[in-house]
Image: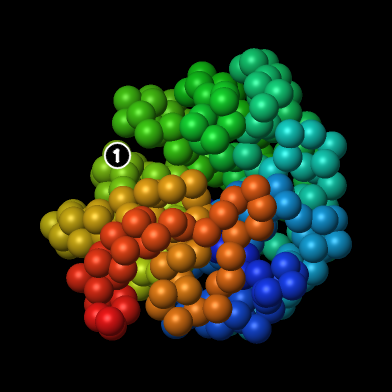
Protein backbone atom coordinates (compact mmCIF):
# COMPACT_ATOMS: atom_id res chain seq x y z
CA UNK A 1 0.00 0.00 0.00
CA UNK A 2 1.37 3.39 -0.97
CA UNK A 3 0.36 6.86 -2.08
CA UNK A 4 -1.43 9.98 -0.84
CA UNK A 5 -4.65 9.48 1.10
CA UNK A 6 -6.86 12.24 2.46
CA UNK A 7 -8.37 11.90 5.92
CA UNK A 8 -11.55 13.57 4.72
CA UNK A 9 -13.62 15.92 6.85
CA UNK A 10 -17.34 15.26 7.10
CA UNK A 11 -19.36 18.30 6.00
CA UNK A 12 -22.45 18.90 8.09
CA UNK A 13 -25.54 20.90 7.15
CA UNK A 14 -27.33 23.49 9.27
CA UNK A 15 -29.58 20.81 10.76
CA UNK A 16 -26.55 18.76 11.80
CA UNK A 17 -26.79 15.92 9.30
CA UNK A 18 -24.16 14.98 6.70
CA UNK A 19 -24.12 17.36 3.72
CA UNK A 20 -23.78 14.95 0.81
CA UNK A 21 -23.81 17.69 -1.82
CA UNK A 22 -20.64 19.24 -0.40
CA UNK A 23 -19.17 15.81 0.22
CA UNK A 24 -19.47 14.99 -3.47
CA UNK A 25 -17.79 18.29 -4.35
CA UNK A 26 -14.92 17.53 -1.96
CA UNK A 27 -14.44 14.07 -3.46
CA UNK A 28 -14.30 15.53 -6.97
CA UNK A 29 -11.72 18.11 -5.76
CA UNK A 30 -9.58 15.29 -4.37
CA UNK A 31 -9.86 13.19 -7.52
CA UNK A 32 -9.04 16.10 -9.84
CA UNK A 33 -5.91 16.79 -7.75
CA UNK A 34 -4.45 13.29 -8.12
CA UNK A 35 -5.03 11.92 -4.62
CA UNK A 36 -4.66 8.13 -4.40
CA UNK A 37 -7.51 7.53 -2.00
CA UNK A 38 -9.92 8.75 0.64
CA UNK A 39 -10.31 7.94 4.32
CA UNK A 40 -13.94 8.60 5.26
CA UNK A 41 -15.24 8.32 8.80
CA UNK A 42 -11.92 8.75 10.58
CA UNK A 43 -11.24 11.03 13.52
CA UNK A 44 -10.77 13.95 11.08
CA UNK A 45 -14.27 13.04 9.90
CA UNK A 46 -15.53 13.30 13.52
CA UNK A 47 -16.50 9.63 13.71
CA UNK A 48 -16.93 9.61 17.53
CA UNK A 49 -20.16 11.57 16.91
CA UNK A 50 -21.59 9.14 14.31
CA UNK A 51 -24.57 6.87 14.69
CA UNK A 52 -24.33 3.37 13.21
CA UNK A 53 -26.62 4.42 10.38
CA UNK A 54 -24.41 7.43 9.58
CA UNK A 55 -21.37 5.17 9.34
CA UNK A 56 -23.20 2.94 6.86
CA UNK A 57 -24.56 5.82 4.77
CA UNK A 58 -21.20 7.62 4.68
CA UNK A 59 -19.25 4.49 3.72
CA UNK A 60 -21.76 3.62 1.03
CA UNK A 61 -21.83 7.12 -0.48
CA UNK A 62 -18.07 7.64 -0.47
CA UNK A 63 -17.38 4.17 -1.87
CA UNK A 64 -19.84 4.61 -4.72
CA UNK A 65 -18.35 7.98 -5.71
CA UNK A 66 -14.71 6.97 -5.24
CA UNK A 67 -15.08 3.78 -7.25
CA UNK A 68 -16.48 5.85 -10.11
CA UNK A 69 -13.65 8.39 -9.78
CA UNK A 70 -10.95 5.72 -9.51
CA UNK A 71 -9.83 6.46 -5.95
CA UNK A 72 -9.15 3.89 -3.22
CA UNK A 73 -11.16 3.87 0.03
CA UNK A 74 -9.71 3.20 3.47
CA UNK A 75 -12.71 3.44 5.78
CA UNK A 76 -12.26 4.78 9.31
CA UNK A 77 -13.26 1.86 11.53
CA UNK A 78 -11.57 2.55 14.85
CA UNK A 79 -13.14 2.17 18.26
CA UNK A 80 -12.21 1.64 21.89
CA UNK A 81 -14.18 -1.60 21.56
CA UNK A 82 -12.53 -4.42 19.62
CA UNK A 83 -15.90 -5.90 18.68
CA UNK A 84 -17.28 -2.56 17.49
CA UNK A 85 -14.18 -1.93 15.37
CA UNK A 86 -14.57 -5.35 13.78
CA UNK A 87 -18.25 -4.67 13.12
CA UNK A 88 -17.31 -1.43 11.34
CA UNK A 89 -14.71 -3.29 9.25
CA UNK A 90 -17.39 -5.69 8.07
CA UNK A 91 -19.76 -2.82 7.33
CA UNK A 92 -17.08 -1.00 5.35
CA UNK A 93 -16.36 -4.14 3.35
CA UNK A 94 -20.05 -4.55 2.54
CA UNK A 95 -20.08 -0.99 1.21
CA UNK A 96 -17.07 -1.55 -1.05
CA UNK A 97 -14.09 -0.21 0.92
CA UNK A 98 -10.62 -1.46 0.01
CA UNK A 99 -9.24 -1.39 3.56
CA UNK A 100 -10.04 -0.28 7.11
CA UNK A 101 -8.18 2.25 9.24
CA UNK A 102 -8.20 1.08 12.87
CA UNK A 103 -6.91 3.40 15.59
CA UNK A 104 -5.39 2.17 18.84
CA UNK A 105 -8.15 2.06 21.48
CA UNK A 106 -8.47 5.41 23.20
CA UNK A 107 -9.10 6.21 26.86
CA UNK A 108 -9.05 2.59 28.06
CA UNK A 109 -5.26 2.57 27.35
CA UNK A 110 -4.43 -1.10 26.67
CA UNK A 111 -0.87 -2.25 27.31
CA UNK A 112 1.30 -3.61 24.48
CA UNK A 113 -0.09 -7.14 24.77
CA UNK A 114 -3.62 -5.73 24.68
CA UNK A 115 -2.78 -3.76 21.53
CA UNK A 116 -1.33 -6.87 19.92
CA UNK A 117 -4.43 -8.91 20.68
CA UNK A 118 -6.78 -6.10 19.64
CA UNK A 119 -5.28 -5.75 16.17
CA UNK A 120 -4.73 -9.48 15.78
CA UNK A 121 -8.37 -10.29 16.51
CA UNK A 122 -9.64 -7.65 14.11
CA UNK A 123 -7.23 -8.73 11.38
CA UNK A 124 -8.17 -12.38 11.89
CA UNK A 125 -11.81 -11.72 11.02
CA UNK A 126 -11.91 -8.54 8.95
CA UNK A 127 -12.89 -9.12 5.30
CA UNK A 128 -10.67 -6.19 4.26
CA UNK A 129 -6.99 -5.47 5.03
CA UNK A 130 -6.22 -3.45 8.16
CA UNK A 131 -4.27 -0.20 8.35
CA UNK A 132 -3.29 0.31 11.99
CA UNK A 133 -3.21 3.86 13.34
CA UNK A 134 -0.91 5.02 16.13
CA UNK A 135 -1.50 8.56 17.43
CA UNK A 136 -0.55 8.78 21.14
CA UNK A 137 -1.45 12.47 21.44
CA UNK A 138 -5.11 11.64 20.80
CA UNK A 139 -5.43 8.20 22.40
CA UNK A 140 -3.16 8.24 25.44
CA UNK A 141 -1.33 5.07 24.36
CA UNK A 142 1.74 4.58 22.15
CA UNK A 143 2.14 1.38 20.15
CA UNK A 144 5.84 0.56 20.41
CA UNK A 145 8.03 -0.60 17.50
CA UNK A 146 8.29 -4.09 19.01
CA UNK A 147 4.51 -4.47 18.94
CA UNK A 148 4.29 -3.19 15.37
CA UNK A 149 6.97 -5.70 14.37
CA UNK A 150 4.97 -8.58 15.89
CA UNK A 151 1.84 -7.47 14.08
CA UNK A 152 3.64 -6.95 10.76
CA UNK A 153 3.69 -10.72 10.23
CA UNK A 154 -0.12 -10.90 10.06
CA UNK A 155 -1.16 -11.43 6.45
CA UNK A 156 -4.24 -9.20 6.79
CA UNK A 157 -2.40 -6.17 8.19
CA UNK A 158 -1.29 -4.02 5.27
CA UNK A 159 0.07 -0.83 6.81
CA UNK A 160 0.57 1.44 9.80
CA UNK A 161 -0.38 5.11 9.92
CA UNK A 162 2.29 6.35 12.31
CA UNK A 163 1.71 9.66 14.12
CA UNK A 164 3.82 9.45 17.26
CA UNK A 165 5.89 12.42 16.10
CA UNK A 166 9.09 10.57 17.00
CA UNK A 167 11.45 10.08 14.07
CA UNK A 168 13.49 7.68 16.21
CA UNK A 169 10.40 5.51 16.61
CA UNK A 170 9.58 5.80 12.91
CA UNK A 171 13.06 4.62 11.98
CA UNK A 172 12.90 1.65 14.35
CA UNK A 173 9.52 0.64 12.94
CA UNK A 174 10.52 0.93 9.27
CA UNK A 175 13.73 -1.01 9.83
CA UNK A 176 12.02 -3.75 11.85
CA UNK A 177 9.03 -4.44 9.59
CA UNK A 178 11.19 -4.44 6.46
CA UNK A 179 8.75 -4.79 3.52
CA UNK A 180 6.03 -6.79 5.26
CA UNK A 181 3.78 -3.78 5.78
CA UNK A 182 3.82 -0.18 4.56
CA UNK A 183 4.46 2.74 6.89
CA UNK A 184 2.36 5.80 6.10
CA UNK A 185 2.94 9.21 7.65
CA UNK A 186 0.25 10.39 10.03
CA UNK A 187 2.05 13.68 10.59
CA UNK A 188 1.66 15.97 7.57
CA UNK A 189 4.78 18.01 8.26
CA UNK A 190 6.93 14.88 8.64
CA UNK A 191 5.87 13.24 5.38
CA UNK A 192 9.11 14.09 3.57
CA UNK A 193 11.28 12.86 6.45
CA UNK A 194 9.31 9.65 6.95
CA UNK A 195 9.36 8.82 3.25
CA UNK A 196 13.09 9.55 3.09
CA UNK A 197 13.48 6.78 5.69
CA UNK A 198 11.37 4.37 3.66
CA UNK A 199 7.76 5.35 4.31
CA UNK A 200 5.33 4.73 1.47
CA UNK A 201 3.00 7.71 1.67
CA UNK A 202 0.71 9.74 3.90
CA UNK A 203 -2.80 9.83 5.30
CA UNK A 204 -3.15 13.59 5.42
CA UNK A 205 -5.36 16.25 6.96
CA UNK A 206 -3.80 19.11 5.00
CA UNK A 207 -4.61 17.42 1.70
CA UNK A 208 -8.24 18.38 2.34
CA UNK A 209 -7.19 21.85 1.15
CA UNK A 210 -3.93 21.20 -0.81
CA UNK A 211 -4.47 17.74 -2.34
CA UNK A 212 -2.42 18.52 -5.44
CA UNK A 213 0.67 19.52 -3.50
CA UNK A 214 0.48 16.57 -1.11
CA UNK A 215 -0.01 14.19 -4.02
CA UNK A 216 2.98 15.68 -5.85
CA UNK A 217 5.14 15.47 -2.72
CA UNK A 218 4.34 11.79 -2.20
CA UNK A 219 4.83 10.94 -5.87
CA UNK A 220 8.21 12.70 -5.91
CA UNK A 221 9.39 10.73 -2.89
CA UNK A 222 8.14 7.42 -4.33
CA UNK A 223 10.21 8.23 -7.42
CA UNK A 224 13.24 9.01 -5.22
CA UNK A 225 13.25 12.63 -6.39
CA UNK A 226 14.38 14.01 -3.05
CA UNK A 227 15.13 17.52 -4.33
CA UNK A 228 11.60 17.97 -5.67
CA UNK A 229 10.20 16.37 -2.54
CA UNK A 230 12.12 18.77 -0.31
CA UNK A 231 10.94 21.77 -2.32
CA UNK A 232 7.31 20.67 -2.03
CA UNK A 233 7.77 19.91 1.65
CA UNK A 234 8.98 23.45 2.28
CA UNK A 235 5.91 24.76 0.45
CA UNK A 236 3.37 22.74 2.43
CA UNK A 237 5.06 23.14 5.83
CA UNK A 238 3.40 26.41 6.87
CA UNK A 239 0.02 25.23 5.62
CA UNK A 240 0.37 21.96 7.55
CA UNK A 241 1.20 23.89 10.71
CA UNK A 242 -1.86 26.10 10.21
CA UNK A 243 -4.11 23.04 10.13
CA UNK A 244 -3.21 22.23 13.73
CA UNK A 245 -3.57 25.57 15.52
CA UNK A 246 -6.60 24.06 17.24
CA UNK A 247 -8.04 20.57 17.68
CA UNK A 248 -8.33 18.75 14.36
CA UNK A 249 -10.58 19.12 12.33
CA UNK A 250 -11.56 22.61 13.56
CA UNK A 251 -8.94 24.53 11.47
CA UNK A 252 -9.28 22.47 8.28
CA UNK A 253 -13.07 22.84 8.32
CA UNK A 254 -12.63 26.58 8.74
CA UNK A 255 -10.18 26.63 5.83
CA UNK A 256 -12.55 24.77 3.54
CA UNK A 257 -15.36 27.15 4.41
CA UNK A 258 -13.10 30.12 3.62
CA UNK A 259 -12.18 28.47 0.31
CA UNK A 260 -15.83 28.31 -0.71
CA UNK A 261 -16.82 24.81 0.28
CA UNK A 262 -19.89 24.51 2.50
CA UNK A 263 -18.17 22.34 5.10
CA UNK A 264 -20.32 23.56 7.97
CA UNK A 265 -19.38 23.60 11.64
CA UNK A 266 -17.90 20.76 13.69
CA UNK A 267 -20.26 18.79 15.89
CA UNK A 268 -20.19 19.34 19.62
CA UNK A 269 -18.12 18.98 21.69
CA UNK A 270 -15.94 20.63 19.01
CA UNK A 271 -16.67 24.26 18.12
CA UNK A 272 -15.80 26.68 15.32
CA UNK A 273 -12.38 28.30 15.08
CA UNK A 274 -12.27 31.53 17.09
CA UNK A 275 -11.91 34.97 15.48
CA UNK A 276 -8.22 35.43 16.27
CA UNK A 277 -7.19 32.07 14.84
CA UNK A 278 -9.50 32.55 11.85
CA UNK A 279 -7.77 35.84 11.05
CA UNK A 280 -4.38 34.10 11.20
CA UNK A 281 -5.68 31.28 9.00
CA UNK A 282 -6.95 33.75 6.40
CA UNK A 283 -3.45 35.25 6.09
CA UNK A 284 -1.99 31.81 5.34
CA UNK A 285 -4.69 30.97 2.79
CA UNK A 286 -4.20 34.31 1.03
CA UNK A 287 -0.41 33.92 1.08
CA UNK A 288 -0.64 30.58 -0.73
CA UNK A 289 -3.41 31.69 -3.12
CA UNK A 290 -5.97 29.36 -1.55
CA UNK A 291 -8.46 32.20 -1.16
CA UNK A 292 -8.78 35.74 -2.48
CA UNK A 293 -7.70 38.67 -0.33
CA UNK A 294 -10.69 40.39 1.24
Tell me how the rendering is colored. Answer: rainbow
Give the crowd class for mark 1: few <14, some 14-19, many >=20 residues within 10 Å.
Answer: some
Is residue 135 or residue 266 the one in the foreground? 266
For the point 46% across and 65% down, the residue is: 254
Is residue 159 or residue 206 the one in the foreground? 206
Quadrant of the rendered image containing residue 98? bottom right
Place of residue 86 in the rendered image (x, y in percent of width and height, measured from the top left):
80, 43
Quadrant of the rendered image containing residue 163? top left
Secondary structure state at the residue bearing disc 1: loop
Place of residue 255 in the rendered image (x, y in percent of width and height, measured from the top left):
42, 67
Place of residue 231 in the rendered image (x, y in percent of width and height, measured from the top left):
16, 60
Q: Which residue is mark 1?
A: 197
For the point 68% across and 74% down, the residue is: 14
Residue 222 falls left or right of residue 288: right
For the point 35% across and 73% down, the residue is: 212
Residue 110 falls left or right of residue 28: right
Place of residue 261 in the rendered image (x, y in percent of width and height, measured from the top left):
50, 79
For the point 27% across and 43% down, the residue is: 193
Q: Residue furthest front?
A: 275
Is any part of residue 130 visible from this angle? no
Residue 289 falls left or right of residue 227: right
Amino acid sequence: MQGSYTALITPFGKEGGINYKTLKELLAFQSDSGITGIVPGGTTGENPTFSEEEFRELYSFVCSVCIELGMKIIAGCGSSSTEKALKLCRMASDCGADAALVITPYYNKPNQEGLFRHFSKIADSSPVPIVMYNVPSRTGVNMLPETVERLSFHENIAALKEASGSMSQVQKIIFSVEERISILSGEDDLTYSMMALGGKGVISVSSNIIPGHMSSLVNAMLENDYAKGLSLSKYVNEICTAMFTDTNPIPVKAALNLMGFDAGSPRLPLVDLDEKKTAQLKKILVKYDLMEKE
